[in-house]
Image (cartoon, grey):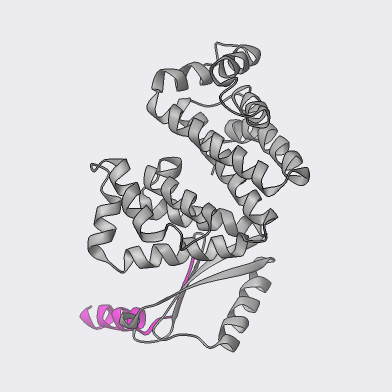
């Protein structure tokens, strides 16, 4: 969650992005997203620039002029307007500003996917990619290894998914490798899935079952969770025979564990006392 000061700083740019996305076509929104994420990469490499753009001793106008002087002629006018609004806000620190620029790029990517009618697919593709990675320990270790060059890990992801998923999915998977919001790879992917679902006004429910659910069972579970949380819920289902039976459901920080494995563990603990 963003701190209040960062949330307020982000809000002005987010409002401008929403206004722009409402009337722009997919190509223009995608271009803004790509340029914004490229600026985020620049800020990740240049800590002095991050500090200057987040410096509370500088006026908002001064910070906006600084970003304009650096990016003018290198990004489109729409991107420059959004980033000027972003750095003109008051941030808690340089790292928070970087997170804000990354988040703006992600929101633009998701807006483009929404405009193209591909948002649900992007959400699902991100989740399935995470499942593929977690199901291959060697691949998971290689992608999560922050000591390995980012370029080599990005090339590995390119070999795995390029041309097989939507362009927005590919860009978001690459961002997860860089550590979206300072997170690890797995956490980055999970957060991006949540943001894609939120863009569709949905919560994400991570469901673990021993066997696959039928379509009727999925619909019934989604309906019950929607009643509980007051909004539609996107189910992300993982099959894990190790839980033996029952089901584990996690929505945000809420965990509902009705698995046989948990009940057996509790029984063993009780017998050991």
* Majority secondary structure of magenta residues: helix
Whether residue 136 is visible here, answered yes or no, is: yes
- Apparent side of residue 137 relative to residue 183 in the rendered image (left or right): left
x and y, in percent, of residue 90 in the image: 60, 23
x and y, in percent, of residue 69 in the image: 57, 14
The quadrant of the image that shows the N terminus is top right
Which one is in front, 147 or 94? 147
The quadrant of the image that shows the C terminus is bottom left
Which one is in front, 60 or 165? 165
x and y, in percent, of residue 64 in the image: 62, 18
The structure residue drawn at horizontal position 52% and vertical position 27%, both measured from the top left corner, is 92
Q: Please check the rendered image and state whether residue 259 is part of the magenta-colored stretch, yes or no.
A: yes
In the image, the segment drawn in magenta is 254-273
The structure residue drawn at horizontal position 27% and vertical position 67%, both measured from the top left corner, is 136
The structure residue drawn at horizontal position 32% and vertical position 42%, both measured from the top left corner, is 151
Q: Quadrant location of residue 134? A: bottom left
The structure residue drawn at horizontal position 66% and vertical position 59%, both measured from the top left corner, is 200
Report how many numbered discs are placed on residues in the image.
0
Q: Which residue lies furthest to the front in this view?
A: 163
Whether residue 2 is visible here, answered yes or no, is: no
Which one is in front, 160 or 63? 160
107 versus 202 height, above or below: above
């Amino acid at each position: 969650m963003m701190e209040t000061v960062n949330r307020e700083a982000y809000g002005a740019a987010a409002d401008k992005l929403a206004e722009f996305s409402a009337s722009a076509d997919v190509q223009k929104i995608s271009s803004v997203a790509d340029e914004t994420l490229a600026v985020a990469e620049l800020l990740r490499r240049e800590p002095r620039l991050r500090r200057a753009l987040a410096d509370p001793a500088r006026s908002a106008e001064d910070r906006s002029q600084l970003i304009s002087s650096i990016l003018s002629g290198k990004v489109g006018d729409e991107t420059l307007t959004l980033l000027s609004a972003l750095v003109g806000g008051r941030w808690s620190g340089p790292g928070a500003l970087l997170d804000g620029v990354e988040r703006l790029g992600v929101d633009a990517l998701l807006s483009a996917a929404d405009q193209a009618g591909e948002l649900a697919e992007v959400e699902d593709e991100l989740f399935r990619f995470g499942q593929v990675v977690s199901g291959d320990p060697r691949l998971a270790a290689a992608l999560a290894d922050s000591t390995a060059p980012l370029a080599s890990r990005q090339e590995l992801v390119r070999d795995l998914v390029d041309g097989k998923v939507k362009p927005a999915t590919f860009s978001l998977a690459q961002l997860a490798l860089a550590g979206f919001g300072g997170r690890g790879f797995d956490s980055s992917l999970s957060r991006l899935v949540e943001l894609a679902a939120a863009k569709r006004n949905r919560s994400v429910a991570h469901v673990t079952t021993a066997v696959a659910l039928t379509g009727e069972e999925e619909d019934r579970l989604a309906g019950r969770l929607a009643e509980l949380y007051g909004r539609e819920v996107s189910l992300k289902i993982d099959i894990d025979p190790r839980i033996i039976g029952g089901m584990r459901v996690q929505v945000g920080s809420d965990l509902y564990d009705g698995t046989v494995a948990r009940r057996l563990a509790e029984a063993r603990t009780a017998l050991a006392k």
